[in-house]
Every structure is written in C-alpha cells, then in structure tokens.
Image: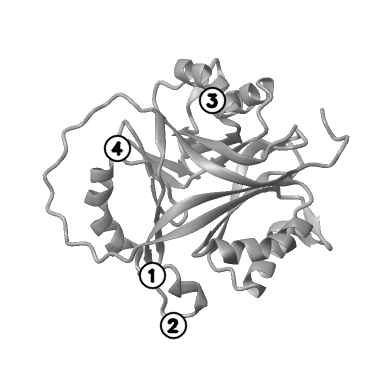
Amino acid sequence: MKLAGRAKMLRVHFGEGDNWKDRPFYRAIAQKCRELDIAGATVLRGIAGYGASSLIHRSHVLSFSHDAPVMVSVIDSEEKIRRLLPFLDEAVDEGLVAMSEVEVIKYVHQDGIRS
Amino acid sequence: MSGLRGAEGVPKSPEKVEEVLPRLHQMAGTGLIEIQGTLVVKPTEIEKKQGTQESLPPLKREGKAKLMRIYIGENDKRRDIPLHKALIESMRANGIAGVTVYQGILGYGANRRIHRDSALHLSHDQPVMLSVVVDTEEKLRAYFPILDEMVQQGLVVLSDVDIIKYTHNFPATECGKGARQ
C-alpha cells in the first residue's frame, strides 16, 4: 500500500459509550476501515468534552461510566476516505465527522508483516 | 477547527470561532490555540439558537504554522527506549518546540496489527500519536532526515494551521518569532 503527497484526514467525534450493533462504535469503525483497505485508523480517548447533545462527556473512574469523548482519526487518499462515508452516514446518529487536508511525509511499515 | 492544546473542537462556523476565541484566550494562559480549516462531512442535528453573549475584544497574535502528526506504536523502541520518548528528546535537541503525546485506545497502521488497550490483554501495544506545532515549514523539513531515520514504521503527516496565541514566559527565542506578526 502506498500513501504519499496530498491526502485527507477524517476525524469522527463521539462518545465511548456509543454502540453499533452491540459493540463499541470505535471498534466498529476501526474494523470497517480495515475491511475497506484504508491505510490506518487511530482511536484516541479524551478526558472531557461536550458535543452536539451538549452533554458533558466525562470518564469517571469511580462510577465505571464509559462516556468519555472518543475521536477516531483516519488518514488516506480522498478516494479511500470517501468509501467510508456511507458507513458513517448510517452509523453516526450523534456525533461529528470532519475532514481536512494533510500532506503525507512518511508512511512506512515492516515488509512482510501483513495480516 | 480550534483546539486548546490537548483539546479539540469543531465549531459550527467561522463566526462561532470568533465568538469563543476571547474566552479561550483567557483560559489558555501561556498555552497555544490553533485553528485549522475543516470540511464538515456530517454535522449533527440540533441547531441551537445562538446566545447573545458579549465578547471581549480579542488580543490576537496570529500566524501561519505547520502541525505535524506522527502515528506510531507504544511498543516501538529506539535503542531500548520508547520511540515517543526518543522523538521528544530528539526534537528538543533540535529546537522543535511544542510536542504533545497522545495515547490511543485502539488502532491499526501500516502493518495492520490492531493495537488495543484491553484489561484482558497483556499486550501494551497501543497506538501513540505525537502532535507537533512548528512555526516554519523549513524548520520541520530540516528535521525530516532525523525523523526519517528514527521512525521505522508509522505515519507522519503535515497540515496547515493558524496560530492564534503563542506566548513565552521567557525572552523570545527562535521558536516564537516566526509565529508572531
């Protein structure tokens, strides 16, 4: 897989407690990205935030609540990223999806380690 | 998009950015606020009435800058120390200021391993993202050969950002000059 020059970065913001078909939504996105042969996906957990619903998302150690804000960042060519949009249209009913321009400086992996 | 270092948000419109900036200025202290053009692909429902709030006149320090993001694994090592630590040290040594390391909870990259943070897994190979804001592209480009040698697998991307506030508590150094106007 080659990735170089101008590319797009897609960021999806939602809550850690959001589910898609009985499993965490962030896991579903990462898996969908793999299925679509997208170069990579990274899920980052925030410590506080608020979104479209104006509810404050917070990760509480004591309450075992899992509603921390979560962001998935996906970087690939515009064409590949656009393949992911129908899935997001269907799956995101509360959250935000934003796209921006990036320039890929380096994309490397160890040869042979592909599963 | 505006972000308080370590925080990111996507406001509804440029006007909204203007509206929240004065308050962010007050809150940011010596921190950094960046604004990045973003195309919203899927906005969420709820359209709210905009509150009529008085805004303080902003004391803007603006400038163009570059934001570099490096995606690696937490287990990646360089000479027996974690790669993200090695990168921070190397950037400090090369006068690249403003690095934040984020630990992810799940992800996959070039080699398609799934990095996962799970209590049941003993693996600690979570994704790590470093975000680096530098005032000039030249400065970053000069650092690329070193970066190139250090990052053996991963992804490095660059994007344009507008710096809104960038203050130093000590006399201006090379790092700060370019970002100010």
Question: Which kind of residue does numbered mark 4 sit on?
Answer: Lys
User: Where does label 3 land, which residue?
Assistant: A25
The residue at the point 16 percent across, 60 percent down is B56
Percent x, y of residue B54? 12, 53
Where residue B12 is drawn, which disc sits there? Answer: 4
- Which label lies toward us, 1 or 2? 1
Q: Secondary structure at mark 4?
A: loop
Question: Which kind of residue does numbered mark 1 sit on?
Answer: Arg
CA distance for labels 2 and 4:
36 Å
Percent x, y of residue B87? 69, 62
Report whether A77 appears left or right of B84.
Answer: left
- Which label lies toward us, 4 or 1? 1
Q: Secondary structure at mark 2?
A: loop
CA distance for labels 1 and 3:
41 Å
Q: Residues within 10 Å of mark 4 (few under 14, many from 20)?
A: few
Which residue appears farthest toward the right when viewing the image? A112
Where residue B170 is drawn, which disc sits there? Answer: 2
